Amino acid sequence: MSDEVDEVESQESAADDWGDALNEQADAEAGAADDWGDALNEQADAEADAVGDNIETAEMQPLQADAVISADEVNLDVILEIPVTLSMEIGRTEISIRNLLQLNQGSVIELDRLAGEPMDVMVNGTLVAHGEVVVVNEKFGIRLTDIISPQERVKKLR
């Protein structure tokens, strides 16, 4: 039995040694972290002092809410060559994946538009006009019947 007591005491002693070692390591790391923190703070203070001598206050003119840009001042040349995607939308519908997978050649999908209603003309996904389908030289085209005003486009974005 004394052997078992000696073994338990040696395990407790080893556990105490490990605990002491871990505490010493934590203390050393905390001291090192404090040293790094102090060094970083000193460096930041030195940089702030160096920059502080060169700081100037910028003078800004007040914004004018009623400033109007005339057509002569607008230079559209910078945007004229930017490509955009123009698409026509006949109509839309929502369909479940189950019904979508059951479609085959000859299937008919009902859209939310009536026959004869104008199509939507979209530029990069934004409605800009309405129109009707025409055939020109055996190719489909669209005749614009209504242009959406910029104010109406902004209202639809909200």
Image (spheres, grey):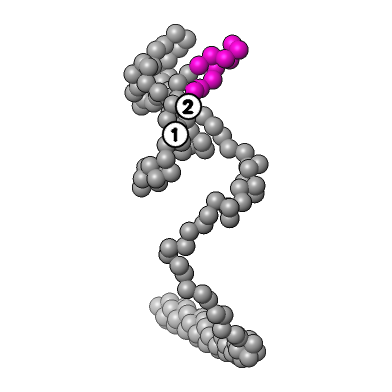
Query: What residue range appears in magenta?
Result: 134-144
Q: Secondary structure at mark 2?
A: strand
Q: Residue furthest top?
A: 106
Depth check, front residue: 57 or 112: 57
Locate residue 115: give its quadrant. Answer: top left
**Residue 15 picture location, percent across and down:** 47, 80
Residue 131 located left or right of residue 82: left
Write down the residue under mark 2.
144
Depth check, front residue: 62 or 102: 62
Residue 54 located left or right of residue 11: right
| Label of residue 147 in the image | 1
Residue at image point 50% right, 85% down: 23
**Residue 144 picture location, percent across and down:** 47, 26
Residue 136 vertical placement versus 56 (above, below) = above
Residue at image point 38% right, 42% down: 152
Amino acid at dot 2? Leu
Mark 2 burial class by Cα count in 10 Å: few <14, some 14-19, many 20+: some
